[in-house]
Image: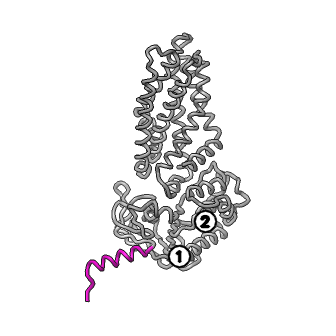
Amino acid sequence: MLASPASVIQAEIAKAKASAISLSAITRRFGHKWALRGIELDVAFGELVVIQGHNGGGKSTLLRVIATAITPTGGTGRILGKDLWRDATTIRAESALLGTSNGLYEDLSATENLLFAARMLGVRQPAERVAEALRQVGLANDANERVRAFSSGMQRRLAIGRLLLQQPKLLLLDEPFNTLDADGVALVSALIAGTRERGGAVVVVLHDLARLNMSPSATYTMTAGRLS
Amino acid sequence: MSAVAAKDLTAERRAKANIVAVTSLGALTLLVFGFAIGPDVATLRTAAAGILWLSVLFSGVLVFHRSYQIELDGGALETLLLYPGERWEIFAGKLLANLCVVLLVEAIVIPVALVLYHVSVPDTWPALLAVIMLGTLGFVTLGTFYSAMASRTRSREVLLPLLLFPMLVPVLLAATEGSSALLVGDPMGDAGAWLRLLIVFDVIFLLAALFVFEHIIEA
């Protein structure tokens, strides 16, 4: 017996709500250039998805759309069961993006940067959590140094420290291993594993899959705005 | 809101060179216009209010530009926008920080103006203070708003004055006329009207900026 169209739609909605990410026909245009062309993507809770592809393929744009940093030009989507268009504020509270830039304030110290993030995220007992995050990323001894004096690797570690404050349900990482040493790579791996253990989902944009010392649930390739 | 304001003020305090440069520009503007007008005391007093607001305008543009530059330098703007919470709170935080910095600049350049332009503090100083505070609020509201708009463009240094200066005309006109009336005497009782006009401008600009900020910062 065939299912009625209404029940099929209901089942699709239920599936989308149960997914960490459910995107359908997502497009994004910058001027005349289409960065994303009809993206279909489903990521379940607990999954680790890797997206690979050449420069300019649209990988970072896709992460920014999922993080609600930019709105798509067209298409529909649900992130953590919330509507991509209407519930951006709720999605932001439960997801975290580590982009290619670290998003730090160079004139502030490491502690001040994380304290600011903690206040914006509404973290309880911010001083203790910040001190713990700095210890975890190996910057406890440089806590009061200005970020301007940090190496690029230390800045990347501090940006990872910001993610540790949040414990998001959805972790979005854009080339997270850039400028990191072996300890830093282990730190990112622990962050990914921790998010999955809590039942969260992780999407990682990577050029070099060898640096990811764990098996992804799925690997996609982006070429000219299309996911395959 | 308070987190954004505290962060901006800390960054501003750390980069001492900026506040020194901004204040120096304000004082130099007063000095240059003072030389241009000449030694006639009556002319200097008449021009004092206008030139004072002009020096605040030039200094303020640097403050507004810096306000979003600290977000752009480390790619922090996107991170800031991805924090949960309402966009208007970011605007309000930046507005509060800019207001503190511009008031600090004014606290230095106003005494300089009083000395250079041979103006004494009038008996009606509370009204003058009200005009300065309301004029500054309107100026900083528009400056913070348009610097956010310009920050999303590549030619932001050029675009900010082009966008801001025309929109500032009503606020600067009311602030200058109100200040001038109170500094050189107000036989016609004009200051009250300019003060009320400033209140109206401030309310309109503040509400409009808080409402529209979300759309321009995400553009």
Q: Is residue B3 above or below residue B186?
A: below
Residue range of the region highlighted in magenta in the rendering? A1-19
Given the current orientation, which residue lies at the most extreme right position?
A: A141
Q: Residues within 10 Å of mark 2 (few under 14, many from 20)?
A: many
Query: Is A10 displayed left or right of B176 in the figure?
Result: left
Residue A175 shows in this picture: yes
Disc nearer the start of the sequence (1/2): 2
Q: Residue at x 64, y 38 (%)?
A: B17
Which residue is more in the foreground, A101 or A104?
A104
Q: Chain of mark 1?
A: A
> What type is the residue that disc 2 sits on?
Leu
Disc ID at residue A199: 1
Which residue is more in the foreground, B95 or B202?
B202
Tell me residue B8's x, y (percent). 58, 45
Does A199 appear in magenta?
no
Q: Which residue is mark 2?
A: A164
Tell me residue A62's x, y (percent). 43, 65
Q: Residue at x 47, y 26 (%)?
A: B175
Q: Residue at x 41, y 33 (%)?
A: B200
> What type is the residue that disc 1 sits on?
Gly
Tell me the quarter of the picture where residue A157 sits: bottom right
Tell me the quarter of the picture where residue A78 sits: bottom left
